[in-house]
Image (cartoon, grey):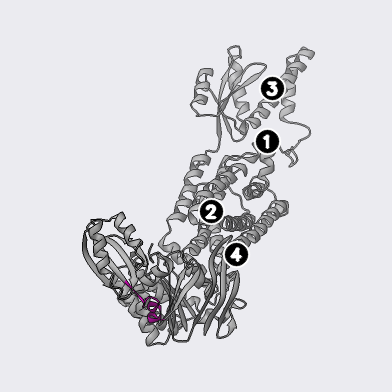
Amino acid sequence: MINIFTLQWQRLRRKPFMVLAMIAMTVVFIIFIGGATNQSEVSIPTSFSDEFPAEDKAALIEELNELEGFNFIETTYHKARENIALGIASFGVRLSEEDYRFIIGTENPNQAIVEQYISSIYWENLRIDQAVEQSGDEQTRQSIETSLERPLIEVDSQIGESEGDVFIFNNQLQALFGMTLFFAIYTIVFSLGEVAEEKQRGSWDRLVLSPVRKWQVYLGYLSYAFVIGLVQIFAVFAMFQFFFGFDIGGKWLEVLLICVVYTFAIVSLGMLIIGLVNRSSQLNAIVPIIAVSMAMLGGAYWPIEIVSNKVVLAFSQVIPVTHAMEALKSITIYGENLTDITQPLSILLLMGVLCMGIGINLMERR
Amino acid sequence: MLETEALRKVFKKQVAVDDVNLYLKQGESVGLLGPNGAGKSTFISMIATLTKPTSGIVTWNGKNVIKNPNIIRPTLGMVPQEIALYKELSAYENVKFFGKIYRLHGKKLEQRVQEVIELVGLKDRQKELVNNYSGGMQRRINIAVALLHEPEIIIMDEPTVGIDPQSRNYILEMVKKLNEEKGMTVLYTSHYMEEVERLCDRIYIMDHGKVIATGTKDELTGILSSEETINLELEQQSKVFEEALREQSTVLKVTEWEKGLRLIVPKNSRELAGIFHLAEQYQAAITSVNIQVPSLEDVFLHLTGRRLRD
């Protein structure tokens, strides 16, 4: 087994192009989608209606910019529309004295967060206005605002898991996890594709006739695909944490465990795919279709939380990417612990065992 | 030593090998001759325990290898039709890897690697990548790998397909040497009758999954001992002349070849006069006549009505 495992590394040394290309593609896509710099703030072009009092504009903008991760930039309505049309921003806001409107170019999960925040500001101002109106004393406004700044009771609100429609969106980590898991599928399955090629070329028969047992031959290939996949995933994570300033957090052991379980599931899925195809050319055709579909349905390209279609959500449950993304986000974004990700990890393990069993069975039946 | 009894393989409804009986004695060199698609590769794959037969038995020294493949595997060297090597590695690395797979190590491994590379005549170029080798050199390394563990029997599946005449000659000489000098039992499949004629003590002719004839070369050509082949070279093919020849009771078979017609007639039938008479009658210009001693090719043609490489 060890000879077959080391042989694969020897061959990789001579032909490293595929693995290097996959790592390079991962890096490029993460930089494009997630942005490799620390500028994680989302810019929102903000315009005001004509009747909005000029003296209140700066104060409102300041208040809006208290929302972490967003930068409300004052501009004209015309300019805001232009920026959205050109794709510079995906949405903007037009603020009036008593209401606000969104200018939407493309659907963006951040919009829900911004809307919730603006809505809370408007409600607050509306209530203060009503209170002032009823008391008939302008001093009331002053005293309410002071009280709000120094409240008697501090309320710390947290978003619970059950509120599935509210989620924290971190563009950098979404891109990092999504793209890394997506491109790792190619590396792993194509590494396993060597088994299909060996069978075509006849060297598999040589191995079968040798004193090496068949399970050792399989294990040699599987362990290579597993290690190369895991190294790729972890190398990209480390690269973006230490060189591009992404914040994965300090829970490296948990992240490693998720990567291990995900890689195992993909290796097994790879065996299933190889068990279904007859030739390596078929594998080359089918892998991109499967990988892209899994990435789309599993929330690697965009957060699965923004998907509301029940059929798509049901499909996503049988895709390893979904569970790996969920586990990674739980650990890094929501600050959860190992015990909280037992379910996605167990599902990934189950998928792995099933696919491996069926895959090897299919290969042996040929 | 090696024997098959009524060995049969059916893929879905296609019978690839149809109740084939074959035996090989120790130190013997046996050829399996047949056109592409005759079932040779499937047959040897079953002998090598790589494919499970639908029915029938394969025995090695009297023991059933279908039930227990490990009876034959350690003593078997298999040369597949494909180049079963890692082309991005050097010849040395390839041979060494398979040596390790056969549990050779240390000095013994190095010694065997060098021995087999020398045997196939590639000692000076062993560090080059297999990818940079010519087809013939790749085939030689393909054979070298099968010899690493000093097998008692070597099964070669068309080991000279698509290579230059020099490499082919080298391989044939090497196989002959292994059989004659080292006493290795050889089962050699090919669709080149001259290779089988040159190398093998006994020959099995296969077609459509069946063994249609077996024996030594002399025994097989003896099938045609009562016949002879006349090759007529014509200025141009003539259908009417061909039909007229077919109607002659003394002409047993007429087939076309690129320059004219090939006739099988009873030996010493003195048919030539009649042929020339017909040619004159149907205005077919004969430019050359050649009377041929029967070959395995003629035997195959006689038995199947087709040529080996059709």
> Where does the image place residue A48, in percent across and percent down from the top left?
58, 18
- State yes or no: discs 2 and 3 in contact (Cβ < 8 Å): no
- Three-letter amino acid code at disc 2? Ala
Q: CA distance from mark 1 to mark 3?
A: 31 Å
> Where does the image place residue A36, in percent across and percent down from the top left?
50, 43
> Which of the two discs, 2 and 1, sits closer to the camera?
1
Magenta segment includes B219: yes
Q: Are marks 2 and 3 on the same chain?
A: yes
Q: Which residue is mark 1?
A: A309
Secondary element type, mark 2: helix
Q: Which residue is mark 3?
A: A122
Q: Is residue B126 visible?
A: no
- Three-letter amino acid code at disc 4? Glu
Q: CA distance from mark 4 to mark 2?
A: 38 Å
Q: Which mark is residue A364?
A: 4
> Which comes before the other along the chain, label 2 or label 1?
2
- Three-letter amino acid code at disc 1? Asn
Q: CA distance from mark 2 to mark 1?
A: 34 Å
> Which comes before the other along the chain, label 4 or label 2?
2
Subunit that carries the residue with mark 2: A
In the rendered image of this protein, does residue A354 appear above or below residue A108? below
